[in-house]
Image (spheres, helix red, strand yellow):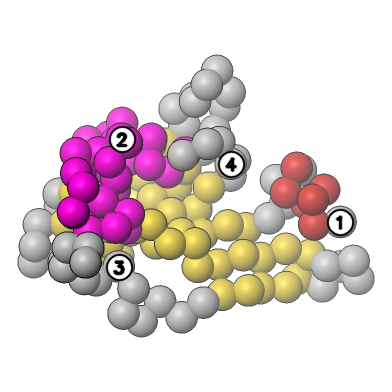
Amino acid sequence: HLSEAFAERKVDKRYRIRVQGHCEFEQLSIEEPLDGKACHSKLQLIEKLDDGSSRLEVKIGSGRKHQIRRHCAHIGHPVLGDRLYGNASEGDIDLQLCAFYLGFKDLAGEWRVFEINLAGHLDSNQTKS
C-alpha cells in the first residue's frame, strides 16, 4: 500500500535544508525537469541566518534522484555541505538536508503522519571531525 502511495505521489514528504546565501523569496516553486522527467519542488523560507545561509522547508511532489540538491543549485543556493552540486569540499560540514515529515493515508483511509523533532538539527557551523 505504501509503495503504491509513493508511486501515485500521494505521500506528503517534507525536508529541512540549509542553503548558501540569503534567499530573497518567501516561497518559490521550481518545476525544472530532471533527467528528462517532470518534477516539482516547493521551497518555503524559514529564516535567514547570521552566517549568510538560509534555512528552508522543502516539499516535493516527485522524487527524482538528488532533486532538492539539484533544484537548489539550479537557483544559485546550493545546499550547504553538498560536494556534488555545491562547492563544499572534504572537511566542510555534512550535507545540510534532513527529511523530517512523512504523511500518507493508511489502509483504513486514515491520514498518518511521522515527524521528527528537528531541534538542534541543521544549525551547526562546525566542520566535520
Circle 1 sits on which residue? Answer: 1
Horizontal relation, residue 52 to residue 116: left or right: left
Q: What are the residue bounds of the magenta stretch?
A: 67-96
Picture disc at residue 60: none
Q: CA distance from mark 2 to mark 3?
A: 18 Å
Specify the amino acid type for callout 1: His
Q: Mark 1 or mark 2: which is in front?
A: 2
Residue occupying the point 8% across, 66% down: 50
Specify the amino acid type for callout 4: Gly
Circle 2 sits on which residue? Answer: 85
Q: CA distance from mark 2 to mark 4?
A: 17 Å
Q: CA distance from mark 3 to mark 4?
A: 22 Å
Q: Is residue 82 magenta?
A: yes
Residue sitting nearer the eye, 84 or 104: 84
Circle 3 sits on which residue? Answer: 122
Residue 29 visible here:
no
Q: Earlier in the sequence, mark 3 or mark 4?
A: 4
Q: Earlier in the sequence, mark 2 or mark 4?
A: 4
